[in-house]
Every structure is written in structure tokens, then in C-alpha cells.
Amino acid sequence: MKKYFRLSLLLSIILTLTISAQESLFQVGSFTIHDELTVQDPIDPDYGRYDAYEVYLSKGDRIAINLSAKEFWPFMFLVSPENETVFVYPDKEKRITTLDTVAFETGNFDLYVVGDTNSFGKYDCEINLASSRSQLIKEDVDLCTSIKYVLEHANADFYFLKDGLYNGEVEVWNSNVKITGSNENKISIMGRESFQSKFYHGDVKAEAENLFNELVSQIKDCLNDGWRETEKDWYESGNSNNYKEKFVKNYETGKIDFRFIKIIIREYDLSSKKYSVEIQIDKQRT
């Protein structure tokens, strides 16, 4: 008998995400399964010991899975409602298997996590999901739409927005989307993935302050009643206190893992371009 976990129900409860629902403009989510292969798990004579999961997808939804284990070499395969199968094998040097694909039909897909017949041990299976209309936006959308798009992708650590390394830096990526009005967008790890969008870097303080105030007002209008605002006045910052900054932070209420957006203005001590204005989008994680 197959060992099934119905991820469609699990994800909708935990992530408040049903990819095919129409309640919000964009829908992106992420969930990690922490499980293990045990002696009680079934064995397929052609593949080996396995766990099976069921996830509902609509045609056009994108699913990205990262499977890792320490005690065995995991591989996986995804079977569509019409029994079309995608096999993925682990990296030759690491016990990691990745799958990134778009659903070509609607229905319940079977996801199998597999080892050989003698495989036992724990594994982690991270699943990122994005609805079909959450994979691309037009370049000429308004500021609010681009903000909401990036905020939604914070639910999956901006996985679907990463587009190659930024200037060859480690753990800094180019973004495949631009927040309207910005001139530089990237994703970097500051203890966690963070989306940074720069709007100004120059030497005119009045321009920087006016832009900062405009963004604070516009972004507040973009967000609904489930968000609150806090601010911090000028304070010394930087690795050597080489600049000072102030910010306004909008954050979700009523959630443990809440998203937030900060509008930041900085004044640098030793720079020909003394002022910058940027937006940072992130998610607080427990």
C-alpha cells in the first residue's frame, strides 16, 4: 500500500495557498517536508524504498523541489494525472536532487521520494510553488503591482526571481523583475534571502528626501488594513559606522512568519554620492 501525504490539503492549511484559487492577484508559497525512509516504508522492485506524496497543481503552475539527505542518495519522480513521469537523479557529488518544472495538466500529481532497497534515513524536501500568473509581470506595471508581486515571492525566499549571480558575487543574485521606478534590483543573503531595490544614489539631499517621502506615502497606500507601520529616525550604521540611515517599515500583523517592506534613506560619510534611497523586502522567519 502506498504511503500518501496529501500536500494539496497540507499546503492550503499551512500556507493559506491553493494555487488554483482566484482570491489574490499573485500566489506563491513554500513548504518543507522533514521525513525519513524507514523499514516500514514500501519497496518497489523496480526502484527501491519510497515515500509518496500527492500535490494538486493547475496547468501552468510552476513547482520547484529541492530534495536532500545525509544517509542515502535520494532521487525522485513526479507522475501526472495522465501518468506522464519526470525522473530526477541526485547530483554526482552531493546527496541533493532538484526538480523545477511547469505542470502541463491539472489534477493530483504523485511525488515519490526514493532510495534503493537498503536506504534508510532522514531527508528534507523543500517545495516551492507559483501559480501561472505569478511567474512574470509586465515591465510597465504600476508601483503597487510590482511591490505586491515581489512581496508574494517573499513566501518562497524569492526562489523564482533569482536570475544568475550578481556581478559574480557569492550568494547575491540578479532579479528577473524590477520594482517600478527603481534602477537596480538584486537578491542577497543577509542571514536570509532579502530583495533590495535601489531608487536613488546621488549627491542631492533634497532629491533623496523627497523620493523617500514619496515612496513612504505610495507604499502605505498599496497595502491593506492587515499591515502596520513603524519607523526609526537617523542612526549610525554600516560596518564601521560609515553612514547613517533612517527607515519606515511596513509589516504584516497576526502572523509569526510575517513579510515586511522597509523604505530606507542613507547618508554616507566618505562617498562622492552621499545619499541613497532603497526598498528592502523580506520575511521574518522563526
Image (spheres, grey):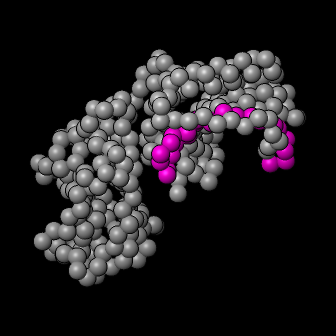
The stretch drawn in magenta includes residue 184: no
Q: How many marks?
A: 0
Q: The magenta stretch spans which residues?
A: 239-262
The stretch drawn in magenta includes residue 240: yes
Q: Give residue 5's quadrant in the image.
A: bottom left
37 or 261: which is nearer to us? 261
Q: Please give left or right for residue 8 compared with residue 248 in the image.
A: left
Image coordinates of residue 2 in percent, x first then y, are: 16, 68
249 or 197: which is nearer to us? 249
Residue at image x 45%, y 44%? 155
Residue at image x 78%, y 27%? 275
Q: Quadrant of the N terminus?
A: bottom left
Q: Is residue 110 visible?
A: yes
Q: Is residue 196 visible?
A: no
Q: Give residue 243's quadrant in the image.
A: top right
Q: Please give left or right for residue 75 compared with residue 80 in the image.
A: right
Residue at image x 64%, y 19%? 214
Q: Give residue 245's quadrant in the image.
A: top right
**Measured along the vertical axis of the image, is residue 4 above or below residue 145?**
below
Q: As drawn, which residue projects farthest toward the right?
A: 270
**Measured along the vertical axis of the image, is residue 83 above or below residue 181?**
below
80 or 116: which is nearer to us? 80
Image coordinates of residue 76 in percent, x first then y, are: 29, 61
Image coordinates of residue 202 in percent, x first then y, are: 77, 23
Residue at image x 19%, y 68%? 3
**Measured along the vertical axis of the image, is residue 95 above or below residue 242?**
below
Image coordinates of residue 271 in percent, x first then y, are: 85, 32
**Measured along the vertical axis of the image, is residue 92 above or below residue 43?**
above
